Amino acid sequence: MKNKKSKIQSLMLRVAVYLSASLTVGILLALVIYILIKGVPNISWNLFSIEYSSENVSLFPALVNTIRMTMISLLIAVPIGIFSAIYLVEYAKRGNKIVSVIRITAETLSGIPSIVYGLFGFLLFVITLGLGYSLIAGALTLATMVLPVIMRTTEEALLSVPDSYREGSLGLGAGKLRTIFKVVLPSAIPGILAGIILSIGRIVGETAALIYTAGTVAQIPSSLLGSGRTLSVHLYALWTEGLNTKQSYATAVVLLMIVIGLNTLSASVAKNLGKGKI
């Protein structure tokens, strides 16, 4: 009787798992197919003109700004996040109350809406520091936003490395710092890259925080102190104006392809690093 009951429960759980997975994949495919059907027919060379105008509604300036914004944000957030995680895992005493507070704070910051980060960046970077609406103000805001994600994922990746790796390295005479950079970090790279991938996706798709910090100018700024819109802001602007909805669908396709391409590339790099091919 008990065996029969356990088999029924196992079957129900298996069905629930398969249904959940199928529903998730189905929703994702539906969104991708809808965007492709709406956007692909509207892609034209005019959308990739070097300069934006009301006639061509070019997304090229926004594409360049997106790449610059992503690179600057990661250059700021990745080193700080990784080194913070190294301190929490490798140097801070286990059971330290300060470490617990930092972890709770990071988890809390991960769940704050992006509009709040936008207002914070506007008050601090745009107004207080006098950076104005600029790429650097937007990048600093996005770096602040993705920093908790990078730090927490890196911390979990470091914690997943067995202590025997550290003990073996130290037993062979390697120092603490050498053990971290030669043994622990290489083993944790796939997990660290997973956090960076999540951060890239959030940076590329962010809109609310950038409207208040980077601005909505549809041109490529000559410096980091100039204002410029990213692809997500460009898409939002076209849709809200209501004059170029077809071009907004085409922009959505380009944005989708960039996100998929970046995720695929990052996953491939993480896989090869995990196998030691790179």
Image: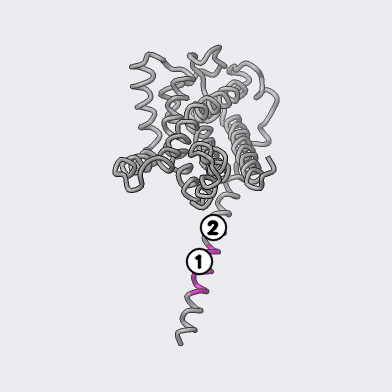
Q: Quadrant of residue 53?
A: top right
Residue at the location (54% across, 35% down)? 200
Q: Nearer the viewer, residue 88 or 62?
A: 88
**Disc 1/disc 2 C-alpha distance (Å):** 10 Å
Specify the label residue 16 is tagged with. Answer: 1
Q: In the visual, does 130 lie left or right of 191?
A: left
Residue 243 in sight from this viewpoint? no
Q: Nearer the viewer, mark 1 or mark 2?
A: 1
Q: Residues within 10 Å of mark 1 (few under 14, many from 20)?
A: few
Q: How is the image coloured?
A: one colour
Give the mark, 1 or 2, whose residue is nearer the N terminus.
1
Q: Compared with residue 63, is residue 257 higher up or lower down, i.e. above or below?
A: below
Which image quarter holds the C terminus?
Answer: top right
Q: Compared with residue 250, is residue 219 higher up or lower down, i.e. above or below?
A: above
Q: How many tags in the picture?
A: 2
Image x and y of residue 82, in percent: 48, 36
Inspect the magenta stretch and tell me whether residue 27 lies in it.
no
Residue farthest to the left, as pictured: 97
Image x and y of residue 5, in percent: 46, 81
Q: Nearer the viewer, residue 134 or 157?
A: 157
Looking at the image, do the residues carrying marks 1 and 2 touch, with CB atoms under 8 Å apart? no
For label 2, the SS is helix
Q: Range of the magenta residues?
A: 10-19
Image x and y of residue 64, in percent: 60, 23
Q: Nearer the viewer, residue 276 or 183?
A: 183
**What predominant SS class does the magenta segment belong to?**
helix
Residue highlighted by disc 2: 23
Q: Quadrant of residue 60?
A: top right
Residue at the location (68% across, 35% down)? 41
Residue type, mark 2 in image: Leu
